[in-house]
Amino acid sequence: MTEHAPLIIDIAGKALTDVDRQRLAHPLVGGIILFARNWESRDQLVQLCADIKAVKPDLLICVDHEGGRVQRFRADGFTHLPPMRAFGQMWMDDGQGSKHREGSGALAAMNAATAAGYVLGTELRACGVDFSFTPVLDLDYGASSVIGDRSFHRDPRVVAALARSLMHGLLQAGMGNCGKHFPGHGFVKADSHVDIPVDGRSLTAILGEDAAPYPWLSSVLTAVMPAHVIYPKVDKRPAGFSAKWLKDILRSRLRYDGAIFSDDLSMEGARRIDGQLIGYTDAALAALEAGCDMVLLCNQSLGLGEHVDELLAGMEAAQRSGRWQPDADSESRRVALLPETVPQPWDDLMRQPAYLQALDLLP
């Protein structure tokens, strides 16, 4: 039987319990996503990541660590990274003002974005974290509160240039990247965590604006996360559950061949498909069938974690019954996101000239 571990789950606390170890050891679990509640200190995070790898060495340890308001670890030496909008503003500033540096604003902004990616990646990797779901590629239309300053800019060309720079910094740190939220979440006001956003524009309009960075970044993009947004002129299903969006458009038309993560299946926009609220297992199966390689279930480990166990049991049953078949290509894409180099220990990193120079370049 083909091995494929498509599930990314979480834990409730700052250390693994026996139940956590049992869930992480499940053959269908391929990774874990960490949150601020899992953080106390760098030493604690290092120990937690080591304990996770002791359960299964190829578990992908992930986190949402973008900078600005979406940064899970903020204390004990972690650099407070600016929101991505800061780099877009730096681009537009053209090097003028109190923080003037040699070179035009655009080139300085690209240099600073690379530095941010390097700092972000090296600090996380020094603590044992493999992967961050960053950067946001959504355009800043000024309408979305959930995206807001997480976006680099309104212009897709500026977004692509700055995102590529950030990705280069991450790659220099030995870390992959994740462009989100395909094909674009910035145009809609509703927050898919609590609502079901609908974007009524045409496919031509979306590909010409919001989705434009994805093919431009094809040489450096290692993962993509689709939006829990419905684009009714393209498909009645949210993008993350739409084979038209993921297989026909992203894979075939835009020729993307990296990993695809679902966004969190516990979000309101995730489990209401074709007008019906469905269970976690059905949502996971729908996402995988549509073209996702991995699916995330977040914040369901709190309390007894019955929804995590429900998903594990449901996916097992689906595999036994033939309702879901493991995919060797999807597993290869998951494994490809694991770092291939040994990270620098924190104390060594703090003295490294490249890291110190990167800190100095941040806005």
Image (tube, rainbow, N blue to C red):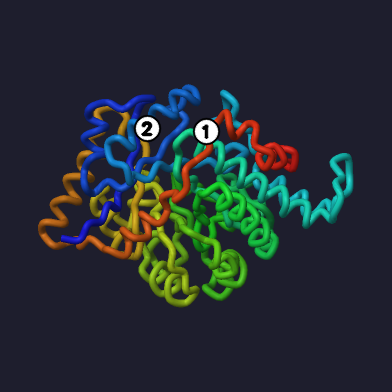
Q: Looking at the picture, does residue 274 appear above or below residue 306?
A: below
| Element type where label 2 sits in the image | helix
Farthest residue toward the left?
321
Return the mark for residue 50: 2
Q: Look at mark 1 in the image and give the residue it sits on.
A: 345
**Residue 157 placement (x, y as % from top left):** 68, 65
Quarter containing the N terminus = bottom left
Q: Position of residue 96 (x, y in %)?
A: 88, 48
At label 2, counting other C-alpha atoms closer than 10 Å, the crowd grade (few under 14, some 14-19, many 20 or more) is: some
Amino acid type for the residue under numbered disc 2: Ala
Q: Where is residue 24 in the image (x, y as percent from the top left)?
A: 27, 39
Residue situated in front as seen by the camera: 119 or 75: 119
Q: Residue at x 44, y 34 (%)?
A: 35
Inter-mark Cα distance, 1 to 2: 13 Å
Of tags 1 and 2, the one toward the viewer is 1
Please give left or right for residue 311 compared with residue 83 in the image.
left
Name the residue nearer the viewer: 358 or 79.
358
**17 up-or-down from 251: above or below:** above
Whichever of labels 1 and 2 marks the residue nearer the N terminus, that label is 2
Residue closest to the eye, 345 or 2:
345
Kindly identify the residue that appears in the image at 55 percent across and 70 percent down: 215
In the picture, the disc for residue 269 is none
Which amino acid type is shown beneath numbered disc 1? Pro
Q: From the viewer's side, name the closer residue of 187 and 173.
A: 173
Q: Which residue is rendered at x = 56% and y = 40% of the image?
A: 122
Tell me if 108 is positioned left or right of 201 in this view: right
